[in-house]
Amino acid sequence: MNKKEIILKAENISKQYRLGSVGTGTLSHDLNRWWHKLRGKEDPYLKVGETNDRSKKATSDYVWALQDINFEIKRGEVLGIIGKNGAGKSTLLKILSKVTAPTTGIIKSRGRIASLLEVGTGFHPELTGRENVYLNGAILGMTKNEITAKLNEIIAFSGCERYIDTPTKRYSSGMTVRLAFAVAAFLEPEILVVDEVLAVGDVEFQKKAIGKMQDISKEGGRTVLFVSHNMAAVKSLCTSGIVLEHGRVVFNGNSEDAINHYLDNTYKTALKPVMEREDRKGNKKLLVNAIYVENKEGIRVAELHSGEEYFICFDYIKSKSIDPKQFTIVVQFKNDNDELVTTIATDELGTQFSEIADNGKIQIHIPKLQFREGNYSLTYMISEKLAFNTPHEVIDFLSDACVVSVIRGDYWKSGILNRPKGFIQEASILITNE
């Protein structure tokens, strides 16, 4: 690889945090570090700490959010950073953006870095949208004349013309993201860092933003680092990808292979029996110990057909009392691109329970399956909503708890098998005369 083409390089990057109310350490720890450094010795706390696995109880005061991260990015490359929640993606972007410093390792970069990490990053709520454009530009090292030359394009792209002279504290999160992205993209940084924050925007803006990132990488020769759980967006935008797991890079290659590696691991996890999973969350007043699907005859099935009737079953054991009036179940399905397809929730359905037995079965009745051919991962959350204005108290939550396989069926009973991919919409088609 020609070193002149490399615009950003991470060498042995690690980040350690101290658990509890103090994020990096105590005064005594800082003094201890200083004393070791003064004597030319290694930081004593680099040898302690656990891997960043949020599903396991901590036995140490320290945790490694990132460990030994190494990669290089060429000019004009779009790098997708993929991983589950808590894998270390946002921590890595903060280090690359120089928002926080690594515990060990160094970042080598050429040129200005613009980052969009959280809604409203770098915006002052009391300043207007226009004033925040100039503020962000100044932070990036742009002159006032350079910002003014781009101002009309930024405002037009953001779609916030009507509110550009209104303080941003009155903006919705979507408006804030629109303006922040427009500033980051149009002020021409050499490296653009974008976190999952784009998911806050509407679908139209997400497509617009992805198109803009493609333009600035292909035509402008600029580098983009992109974190997203939307595998379709990563596939269409990114040229390469890395997969993070528990703070470590487990795959580094082209974007399609990175996505396949991530999804394969997700499905492997989902194929484990529920009771063997260590990543479930909640107070465990009730625990699901098996998930399976039955057809209308009550027979367990491994494959489902579009258009048929099914029952999704959750066997459970209850160990503590639960108020049945506050009992809530939410089940979500994601497709093989890790995109949310649909949600089934008792509160939306208006379902209420009168009793929850100590041992029992939760059945979700699907009168006519509207999934097309493909594999779908199932995530569930069982919770208590103690009052209308309080958050849910999670009882049992498990992401990617199992995989449901659907094969093509004759949904409409027309003699034609339905096409693959997507969701089947109930509809009818008529032709009428004027």
Image (cartoon, helix red, strand yellow):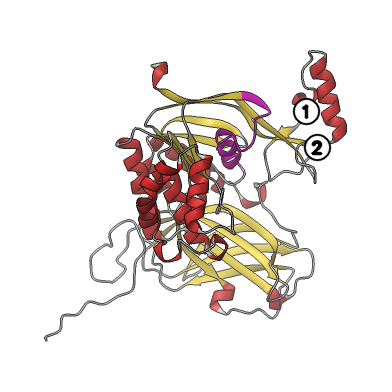
Q: Within 10 Å of the Cα at label 1, are there few (<14), some (14-19), or many (20+) other Cα atoms? A: few
Q: Secondary structure at mark 1?
A: loop
Query: Residue 387: x and y, percent?
Result: 72, 75
User: Would residue 337 be visible to someone looking at this image?
Assistant: no
Label 2 residue SS: loop
Numbered badge on residue 48? 1
Q: Amino acid at mark 2?
A: Asp
Asked if residue 278 can be seen in this view, the reply is yes
Q: Is residue 99 left or right of residue 164?
A: right
Q: Position of residue 173 (x, y in %)?
A: 52, 60
Mark-to-mark CA distance, 1 and 2: 9 Å
Q: Is residue 101 magenta?
A: yes
| Labelled pair 1, 2 in contact (Cβ < 8 Å) | yes
Taking depth in this image into account, of 334 and 99 the one nearest to the observer is 99
Q: Nearer the viewer, residue 32 or 130?
A: 130
Find residue 289 and report its horizontal and vertical position in percent.
66, 57
The quadrant where residue 290 appears:
bottom right
Tell me which segment is drawn in magenta. 87-105
Looking at marks 1 and 2 on the same chain, the residue that comes earlier in the sequence is marked by: 1
Q: Which mark is residue 61?
A: 2
